[in-house]
Image: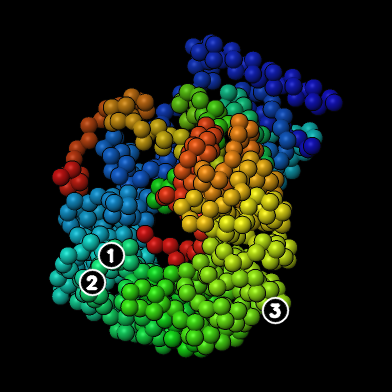
Amino acid sequence: MVIARLQSKDGDIFIIDVDVAKRSNTLKLAIEMSKIDLDDDVIPIENITSNVLKPIIDWLTYHKDDEPSEPIKILKAKPYYISNWDKEFLKMDLKLLYEIMNAAHFLDIKDLVDLGCKHIANIIKISSHEELTEIFEFEATPILLTELEQIENM
Amino acid sequence: MDRRISMWAVTQDVSSATISNIKDGAAGQKNGLLPTATIEKLPDKILLKIFSYLPHKELSRLARVCRKWRTVSCDSRLWTHVSLRPEVSGLHVSSIESLLALISIRFGPSLKYIELPIELITHTVLHELAYKCPNLVQMLLDFSTAMQLHDFSDLQTFPTKLRSMCICLSEVIFMEGFMRKIYNFINGLEVLHLIGTYEKVTEEEEEIYEVINIHKLKSAVPNLRVINLYGIVFVDDSHVEAFSSNCQQLECLALNYCNKVTGSTLKLLFQRCKRLRCLLMYQTVGMMEHAGLLSEHVTAVEWDKTALQELDIGGTELSAECLLDLMGRLPQGLRYLACGQQDAFSDIMIKELLERGNYKSLVALDLDRNENISDEALLAFLTHQGPALRGLVLSGIPHLTEQFWLAVLPLLRNVKILVMGMGDSCCLKIHQKIHIDSLIDCIANCLPELERLEIQWGMSTLRFSDRSSKAIDFIRMRCPRLQSWVLTDGKYFELVKSNFERADRKTVVRTTTNCHVTLVYLLLNYRDLLFN
């Protein structure tokens, strides 16, 4: 097994299978394009802290044998499915999930971003307006009705 | 060895660091280690993706939550495919005015597909779509519930880039007033669906109206590749002839449930449309005074000279001579053969296929309810072609029981779609009991690619036990692509359903009352043939 060393923002070093790392397109590019010597060099990931990087690596490791999914076109909503392992994985504070999604977005791990999106879409679906404001901690900004909304509200 | 040790060390370090972070929240926050993100800080791109998982109804609600969500929910990329038919979970638009507003504010140039119900098909709406949505390529117009057509005398323009159009016809409304206005705009159409009212037809004699003039329509659409005439009561051979005279590009013609078609113009069709590779005539069977597909017309076609790859003649009443002749002359490239519900289909047809060797491209075979085939003949055939098959339907044949399937399943390693068994309601009773567990075990072991499975045996035939859960667990794990499993309603169905539900795969298991598995997913033009 060829390994890669990833260094988080807080300086912790994570040692992972290079094939796992390459499921992140950003890391794949970094490993293949630059002259990183996998035996000696660490790959610094300066904008991601350990508490975010750790679950991402767990997720990548668990899903290392998945086939890459087809690109999802933005279409009308269709049914989707979250596996049990992923369900467990998603049992975390929403704030941490946002961090992970941001990081996964940066690392270009499409499937992980998608998973977070599905999860949040699910929460949105089952929540009322008041619950939404609470769950997602919006500041209550009153919205002026535009002409279109008035039409829609009719 | 060293490496493994260091990996452990690091992992442990990190997890203890994380734990201390979680415990020591305040300190963590100071170091910027604790997450401080909110949903509002997610990039718009991600928010857009979240919204893309939500139906349009939901988006209209979210637009009122906050300003940013409003902007994102209006993003035209979320509005490329829009259904405005609430009965098929589309968006409900209450008035023409609000639709016009939506067209200009939301849809605009990004709109590619739209479904309109009768109330919203007016000349102003079509004008707006023509002007504001230059990328509209696919459109469904649902006239099926119409009592009266809007006035289209002012209709001067219509979307011109349509590639695919679906018109749901009503039984009584003549479309010509509308069609006359759009003929000039639809020359680019490649895919045309005309959906009839077959399902609504009652036994009573009712007058049949030719609500759309196909002889005129065909002149406007010379570029059609796919024609789907579904359950239209008035469509007959002259209409097939009409299309064949003007559509040189035709690849796929579906005439399912068109009872007036006898096949008298099929020969001409194949002579004219050299590219025709798919002909579907499921249930073009005689009804009342109509004869249905006639053997003599089928025999007249020069099958061996065609480029045909896919043929469905299921549920038609062809004679044994005709079927035998057809099997002998099927073109070499045939990959899809649906020939179910044919009382005359027997072992000699299978032998003919085997002798001629024209089955070698076959990937999908449907012999539903052909009770006169023996298990030996099928076994002989599947020994040759089984490994190449991706879809197989052998339901409704009483003597194909456990023993047959246990012998055959190992030959079917590439099958994605499989239908077996025989429902209780069929007149012939099955005397042998089916032990479902060993069958399921065998399927799980032999068919790793399986995506769709239907087992029709009912509760009086199926035997299952406490060990059944184990077999169900096994198939769930071994066939990860299984997305649809149809069973007869009963205790076994409940068992399987709850098993899949516990594993959070809620949509997989269904009953034969609402759902049937077919091979159509294997058709080359499957995507073009989708409507509704």
**Near-viewer residue (B163 or B47):** B163
Q: Nearer the viewer, residue B21 or B473?
A: B473
Q: Is residue B60 above or below residue B469?
A: below
Amino acid type, label 1: Thr
Instruction: Indicate the amino acid at tag 3.
Output: Arg
Q: CA distance from mark 3 to mark 2?
A: 46 Å
What quarter of the picture does the C terminus of chain B occupy?
A: bottom left
Residue B188 placement (x, y as % from top left):
38, 76
Question: Please, which chain is the residue tagged with disc 2 on?
Answer: B
Q: Quadrant of residue A88?
A: top right
Name the quadrant of the N terminus of chain B: top right
Question: What residue is pinned by disc 1?
Answer: B202
Could you tell me which chain the residue with mark 3 belongs to?
B
In the picture, measured across the screen, residue B40 lies left or right of residue A110, that is: left
**Circle 2: element type:** loop
Task: Residue under label 2, please give it.
Answer: B206
| Mark toward the start of the polypeptide (1 vs 3) | 1
Q: Quadrant of residue A137?
A: top left
Secondary-structure class at tag 3: helix
- Judging depth in this view, the residue of B368 and B372 nearest the camera is B372
- Mark 1, mark 3: which one is toward the viewer? 1
* Residue count near mark 1 (Cα–Cα under 10 Å), binned few <14, some 14–19, many ≥20: few
Do the residues at discs 3 and 2 belong to one chain?
A: yes
Q: Residue at x 57, y 64 (%)?
A: B371
Residue beneath the point at 63% across and 30% down: A58
The answer as to whether the residues below labels 1 and 3 share one chain is: yes
Mark 2 is surrounded, within 10 Å at the Cα level, by few (under 14), some (14 to 19) or many (20 or more) other residues, namely few
Mark 1 — on which chain does it sit? B
Kindly identify which residue carries mark 3.
B356
Residue in the image at 78% along x and 38% along y: A2
Name above or below for residue B261 compared with residue B25.
below
